[in-house]
Amino acid sequence: MPLTTAPDTRSISSISAAVLNLLLPHHRTTDASPAPVEAFPHQLRQIADFVRAAEPVVFTLPGFPCKSPNRAKVLGHLPDQGERLSLSFLHSLCTEIERIHAPGARVIICSDGHVFGDLIRVADGHIDAYADELRRLIRESDLPRLSVFDLRDVLGDLPHDTKRAQVHERYAPTLAALHAEVRADDHTLALYRGITRFLVDDTADFTGTRSALQRECRKRAYGVIQRSRAWGNLIADHHPRAVRLSIHPQPAGAPKFGIRLLDAPDAWTTPWHSAALLRTDGTWTLMPRARAEELGRLVHHDGRPSHFEQV
């Protein structure tokens, strides 16, 4: 029988740390100062599992749900330059990892728009179109290390409300448990406040008072967090070994690693809540469409509004 050699533990540890080091400059967090590799033991263990098995490191990233319904923020309901740049960034990370760990890496974009589309007031048809366009961009931009996973991959062609109900019933925490967590945990409280703020900003057709809108959005924010948790639990069932990324800020040591896709003025801005602006120095940033219009001229791509160029 051929002799086999046990994996070199030191080599596995050093490769795993080097992989994580590539992610650290892009850590999306509200922590006051950058954290060292050692502050992420959970991710190091997960990466080491793939390194030990000589397999591609698999990351799951819940996000890329749909465009905001607030047209003062975005250019339309389909992906644009913000998404193109973000997809390219994620693919480049996988390419960099391949130089350290030969099998490379993959990112599964877990598009979650249908999970809470009714709560964020976005039509299911727009959500389908957004996810379909993401797949097209990945294919036509030759980004083979990326893929898209959504509720259609889990529950097929069932009605959208039925899918949401099934996922919520099986995976979501109770409202009472979530209320208690918001009261007790500063990170969950910050998440709740951030989502509430987004819902207020994204609601364009409310006819009541500002205080009534805020009350309604606080209620909807709990529902969004419940569904978000449900989606995360479903993803863990379908991709149990994957390293979990998040587009929300995450503290060092959390089970999920928050990742910043593009430069933005705060830790909460995403391509689906904003428009991309090409600065005069050649760098990109994200900001509300209304602000970008003040600073630049609109550029079209494939016949659709794409981004702004600063003038």
Image (tube, helix red, strand yellow):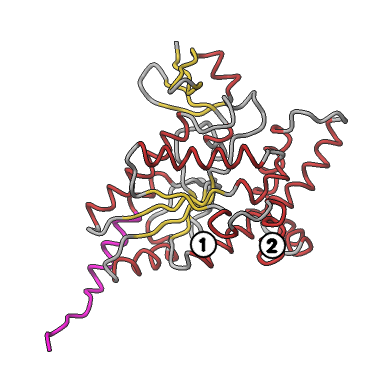
Residue flagged by tag 2: what amino acid is it?
Gln
Q: Position of residue 26 (x, y in %)?
A: 41, 44
Q: Give the residues drawn in magenta, as a range.
A: 1-20
What residue lies at 50% left-to-right and 57% top-to-bottom?
256
Q: Which mark is residue 166?
A: 2
How far apart are labels 2 and 1 at the CA level?
A: 25 Å
- The residue lying furthest to the top in this view is 311
Q: Nearer the viewer, residue 155 or 242?
A: 155
Q: Residues within 10 Å of mark 1 (few under 14, many from 20)?
A: some
Q: Quadrant of residue 167?
A: bottom right
The residue to which callout 1 is attached is 255
Q: Residue at x 69, y 50 (%)?
A: 224
> Horizontal placement of 3 versus 176: left or right?
left
User: How many residues crowd around disc 2 within 10 Å: few (fewer than 14), some, or many (20 or more)?
Assistant: few
Which is more N-terminal, label 1 or label 2? Answer: 2
Q: Quadrant of the C terminus?
A: top left
Q: Is 154 left, or right, of 100 in this rendering?
A: right
Q: Main secondary structure of the magenta part?
A: helix
Q: Position of residue 268 (x, y in %)?
A: 57, 39
